[in-house]
Image (cartoon, grey):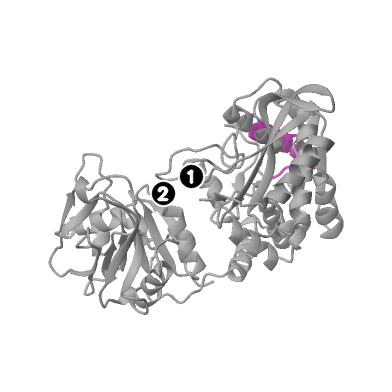
Amino acid sequence: MNQRQTVVVLDFGGQYNQLICRRVRDMGVYTELLPYSTKCEELKKKNPIGIILTGGPNSVFSEDALVLDEKILALNVPILGICYGAQLLAHMTGGKVKSNNDKKEYGKVEINYSDDVLFDGIDKKNICWMSHTDHVSVLGDGFSVTATTDSCPIAAYANRDKNLFGVQFHPEVVHTVDGNKILHNFLYKVCKANGDWTMSGFVSETIESLRKKIGDKKVLCAMSGGVDSAVAATLLHKAVGKQLTSIFVDHGLLRKYEADQVMKVFRDGLGMNLIKIDAEERFLTKLAGVSEPEKKRKIIGSEFIRVFEDVSKEIGHVDYLVQGTIYPDVVESGFGEAALIKSHQNVGGLPSVIDFKEIIEPLRDLFKDEVRRVGKELGLSDEIVMRQPFPGPGLAVRIIGDVTKEKLDLLRDADFILRDEIAKAHLDRDIWQYFAVLTNMRSVGVMGDSRTYDSAIALRAVTSLDAMTADFARIPYDVLAKISSRIVNEVKGVNRVLYDVTSKPPATIEME
């Protein structure tokens, strides 16, 4: 198997770092995000065709500056520095960086590009997205200015002899006009990429790798029925067949009719060795009285593993446990320079002692839409592949406060109405994710001639490309009105419906 071309993205803690990886992969080039502190010898093992230095919140001349292993500059590998990455690259190659609070730039800025390989095929008078206070004030020997703005005389620079490039702006965000073209020029005209990163290639390589790794050993798969675990289980099913036992735990935290659908598609349809465990009472007992979101996630993650341990004892020795962890799970759980946002069941909450040889996470490096494309390559139907993203802890983290059977049933009904009306309005393919949340707020209402004091349901619907950033969906008012009317009239115990209009950031998509 030929080694695929790789571009390494070194993470300096900026908010768009995963988005850079996403853009590069969309252009057919595999990327790996590594910490800024990666040593040259470790990076060389990746045999990268190019290196991208990301943005970040630090100043290159501050005491807490994040610095690059200087030996990396001598690898003769093309490097593109973005924002902080551009300042650091200039600083390390004889240039100077200046902090000037009077000339900081944030948001859309007019920019003038000169003739340079990065800007081939794009309008020289253009718009970019800036987010900086520091800027490069002097370039080292061999470097030349390739773009300017009114406030930033060195908005981009290059040293073509050494294939070193820096851009003060962010080409990876949609607000930079022709930003994708700039990245494409770096990948294909500078790094000489051949575009060998495809989902069909990923599927064949992963199946081959899994067969080689697992051999004749037994595998246990954590099957939640969501898109991620469904695709992970199908990959393993294609690779090792009946050596795989998939365990579907109905923990009582699923959406309405979900358990029946999972069994129908995977056991009856695909012929997967799928065992359903009814564990609602077990999970609800563990969650009784627990309100803190992180604690709920930890309890559910740990209990999942305990269930699998119990089942594995019944089916004999099991060597591997498979989970549907994907890249945003890893990022939001504190990968690299990213701060911990929330623990994910797949990457947090595992007990210190696990009765398995190793955990396999075949989708760990993929974004959600890449996972969907893998699912289609595997022949899964849109019914499964295009399902709503669903957190591992299920409805437990869509109930603010403690979790009870009564609250779960109430939320299930409200959530079903939301999804039903979104589908009827043909909005299900336009909205990335939509769901109902049972708040811990009760309010006064009037139904008929009687006063009520019941629960409030919050609706959340967002548009997104990769779940790293999101905006609230502009659902038509008449659709929202119908959803609200049905929930209040059909779901006993609800007298108020709210709609969340917060983007990510500052909020996360889920409320807990």
Q: Quadrant of residue 89?
A: bottom left
Disc tally is 2
Residue at 38% in and 76% down: 192
Residue that carries the numbered disc 1 in the rendered image: 505
Q: What secondary structure do most residues of the magenta stretch adopt?
A: helix
Residue at 71% in and 22% down: 288
- Image location (x, y in percent) of residue 6: 43, 66
Please tell me the numbered disc located at residue 315. Answer: none
- Image location (x, y in percent) of residue 430: 65, 59
- Image location (x, y in percent) of residue 244: 74, 52
Q: Is residue 472 visible?
A: yes
- Image quadrant holding the C terminus, namely top right
Q: Secondary structure at mark 2?
A: loop
Residue at 72% in and 32% down: 496
> Which dot, 2 or 1, sits closer to the camera?
1
Q: In screen coordinates, is 446 left or right of 349?
A: right
Q: In screen coordinates, is 279 left or right of 73?
A: right
Residue type, numbered disc 2: Gln
- Is residue 175 covered in magenta? no
Residue that carries the numbered disc 2 in the rendered image: 15
- Image location (x, y in percent) of residue 100: 19, 48
- Is residue 309 covered in magenta? yes
